[in-house]
Amino acid sequence: MSGLKNKLEKVAKEIGFSGVAYVEEDQESFFFQNGYANKQDKLAFDKHTRFGIASGAKIFTAVAIAKLVEQGRLDFQSKLADCLSIVFPYFHQDVTIHYLLTHTSGIPDYFDEEEMDDFEELWQTLPMYRVRSGEDFLPLFQDKKMMFSPGERFHYNNAAFIVLGLVVEELAGEPFTSFVQKHIFDPAGMTEAGYFAFDKLPGNTAIGYIKEKDEYRSNIYALPVRGGADGGVYVSASDMARFWDALNQYKLLNAEFTEELLKPHIQVDEDSSYGYGVWIKKDAERIKKYYVVGFDPGVSFHSAYYPETGRKVVVPSNHGAGPYYMVQAIEE
């Protein structure tokens, strides 16, 4: 593994990477860290350091929905209007759970990543300190018109996952975060994971940093106070590896629904497909990897599971970019 360490040191230096890289395969693990969890106090990372993972958390929302389907409370083809009492006046009646999970619903987004690039702009109309639950996002998209008809095409959509979180709450009769804790984090043994509030972060949590000229500032005013169904959970590198294990050992869902979650449901581009809350890279008919990614101000994340070898890679960062290049170096 010394060759890998040298390679990652070189890439980390070139790109100014701040975070960790964790690789696990056949009971063996490799850990690399560079930078600081807290720059002011020069606190180093370890494999238990919690990182915000932004949209990397969408897979947990998809698993939560699949759990409700497994329990018989819902169907992937259920229409949104039949399983959520919140009214969306302009939503198409054919919006289904499947369309929401695959970013093909056409519902309006509160942050359209193809048109907006400054996430902080959102909080000019809705202060971020008021956003602590899925319902708090509704003023940003509830009364907007559809972008396109359901099923027409793939268009990455954060609001779709907010809506899915609201479905979980209504059908389960409990907060989305506690449902995920009970049905995902606990059975997977993810002891460091949680939807922590910015003003109540536990110990050994990396501070997210935004670079401005030659200085760094914390991302505390750039994100909602608490993450939810579309992203913003905190996990450690070792936690995320446990998640991939639990998922593939059917500890979270039975074999049928795990397969449904990890099935390529829609082709996004030449070599990428999307399942339910997860990206899929194929080579001919073989699936090379399942992966999740996340980007927020002061947060970037890439984690992958390679089915042919059982290898798991987790690269979280407390800067806005970097994991992609580290994962590339590991794959090479």
Image (tube, rainbow, N blue to C red):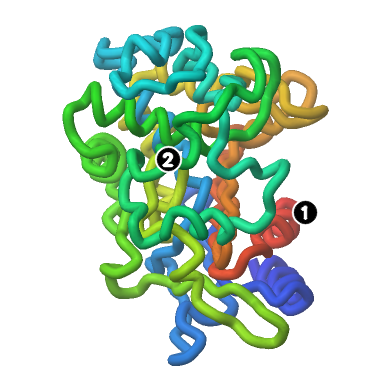
Residue picked out by circle 1: 332
Q: On the image, which quarter does residue 84 sit in? A: top left
Q: Marks 1 and 2: CB-CB under 8 Å?
A: no
Q: Which residue sits at x=55%, y=74%?
A: 209
Residue 193 in view here: no
Residue name at image x 27 percent, y 55 percent: 191
Q: Quadrant of the C terminus?
A: bottom right
Classify 31 as above or below 173.
below
Dot 2 amino acid type: Pro
Question: Mark 2 falls on what kind of element?
Answer: helix
Name the amino acid, label 1.
Answer: Glu
* Number of other residues with Cα within 10 Å of mark 1, as a class: few under 14, some 14 to 19, many 20 or more: few
Given residues 293 and 9, the one toward you in this image is 293
- Asked if residue 168 lies left or right of residue 280, the reply is left
- Name the side, left or right, on which 258 lies relative to 124: left
| Image side of residue 9 versus residue 242, left or right | right
For label 2, count other residues whose C-alpha is less than 10 Å away and answer few (under 14), some (14-19) or many (20+): few
Residue at image mark 2: 139
Task: Give the secondary structure at mark 1.
Answer: loop
Residue furthest left in the image = 173
Please say if 291 is above or below 34: above
Of marks 1 and 2, the one in the foreground: 2
Question: Would you identify the image quadrant in which residue 184 lies?
Answer: top left
Of pointers 1 and 2, the one earlier in the residue sequence: 2
Left or right: 8 in relation to 210: right
Residue 320 image point, x, y percent: 62, 65
The residue drawn where x is 38% and y is 13% is 81
